[in-house]
Amino acid sequence: MEEQNNNENHSLLYNKPRRSLLTFDEATDLSLKVKWKTILCNSGEECWCRIITPEIDIEDKDGNEIYIAGSGAIPKIYAEHIVKLHNDFITYNNLSGITNK
């Protein structure tokens, strides 16, 4: 029991998610229910694109990370707009008590 608590604390301290038990479809479904963010691609700040990813790290049981839009898929201005719309939708649903199915 103490070893399990130490492992959980280590994961929390170093922000390393433990391996998920979600199927790919479950992980994808979860990604639609959490807020998103834009991040830089490998080219950095000056690049025209942005990656859209869930605010929390989500991966399936095979270790596949869930991304909404990968590198080079969408221009920065559209990515930021899509993330804002999605996050506003999630916030509205949470305030309204509507579940996102």
Image (tube, rainbow, N blue to C red):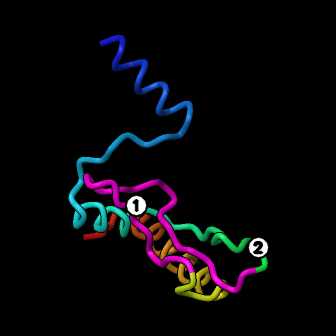
Q: Name the image quarter holding residue 31.
A: bottom left
Q: Is residue 43 above or below residue 7?
A: below
Q: Is residue 19 magenta?
A: no
Q: Is residue 79 visible?
A: yes
Nearest the eye: 10 or 96? 10
Q: Which part of the image, by quadrant, shows the N terminus?
A: top left
Q: Which residues are magenta?
A: 47-71
**Residue 2 location, x and y as percent?**
35, 11
Q: Residue at x 58, y 77 (%)?
A: 84
Q: Is residue 61 magenta?
A: yes
Nearest the eye: 40 or 97? 40
Rounded to the nearest whole Å, what is the CA distance between mark 2 and mark 1? Answer: 22 Å
Q: Residue at x 45, y 54 (%)?
A: 57
* Tag 2 residue: 45
| Residue 1 as seen in the image, left or right of residue 76 | left
Magenta: main secondary structure: loop
Identify the amino acid type marked 2. Glu
| Residue 84 as seen in the image, left or right of residue 56 | right
